Amino acid sequence: MRYDPINLQKDVWIVIPAFNEGKMIADVIAQVGTMFPNIVVIDDASKDKTSTTARNAGATVLKHPFNLGQGAALQTGIEFALSRGASHIVTFDADGQHHIEDVPVMLEQLKQSGADLALGSRFLGNTIGMSKSRGLLLRAATIFTQITTGLKLTDCHNGLRVFTAKAAGQLNLRQNRMAHASEILAGIRKNQFDFIEVPVTITYTDYSRGKGQTFTDAFVIFRDLIAARLLP
């Protein structure tokens, strides 16, 4: 499926949460900017030059005064994009794992399906450089999320997602840390959103692997999710 870069969807916003991504963020913004002009980077109180580098690369930059985690950064970016009249919001990682070429396909399939959001799936698509331990962690997290949410999906912790404005506006992420990924899925069930999964490619590099989740992180995610289910 080809996407005409001349007819850019100017009401699509790309939301990129970032923490200490000064080494990679300019390359990510350059990649995204080849197809989508509206890019907002949420600097989650980085200690490096993430904000300056992202701004110089052409993105709108919002900065948290304190580190709140990826979930909070996404919520900030979503609210900003909606305030700018976004029709669709794309969440995109800052570490270079995602490919912007997948986004037009997700947008097109979302439009054809009439669903509320599209979730990227590396297990329906491709992975490059993923370790066996990472694959086991992600599959275990997916099984856990299937049990706790009842949603049938193949990849629960993929940060590449496309929301309609309607769906994005009804999300209110309370889990500020990495548990937000499963919280989004719980929100899908609560709001009875229609969703589709779309095959995407995830590329792991030495840089992204160094910033990735560990098995210890997984236990923290599970703890946060269980605690969240006990809250009103």
Image: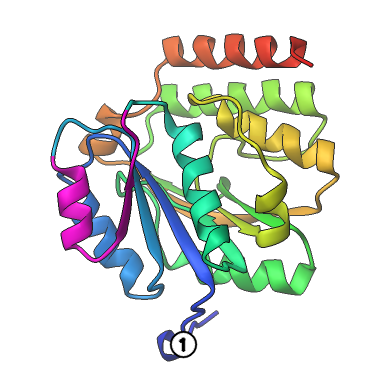
Inspect the magenta stretch and tell me whether residue 167 lies in it. Answer: no
In the rendered image, residue 76, in percent from the top left (x then y), is placed at 48, 43
Could you tell me which quadrant the C terminus lies in? Answer: top right
Residue 149 shows in the view: yes
Q: In the shown orientation, is residue 143 left or right of residue 3? A: right
Residue 128 or residue 91, whichever sits in front? 91
Is residue 143 found left or right of 83 in the rendered image? right
Please state the horizontal and vertical placement of residue 188, each as a whole percent of the image. 76, 41
215 up-or-down from 137: above or below = above
Examine the rendered structure and indicate whether residue 65 appears above or below residue 169: above
Does any portion of residue 125 appear in the rendered image? Answer: no
Which residue is at 56% across, 70% downward?
105
* Kind of residue indicated by mark 1: Asp
Instruction: Identify the residue position indicated by label 1 in the image.
Output: 4
- Which is more toward the observer, 37 or 3? 37
Percent of width and height locating residue 35: 39, 75
The magenta segment: 49-65
As drawn, the residue found furthest toward the bottom would be 6
Name the residue located 16 percent from the left edge and 61 percent from the top edge. Answer: 56
| Image-quadrant location for residue 172 | top right
Mark 1, other Cα within 10 Å: few <14 / some 14–19 / many ≥20: few
Assess whether residue 62 is covered by the magenta stretch: yes
Above or below, 87 relative to 181: below
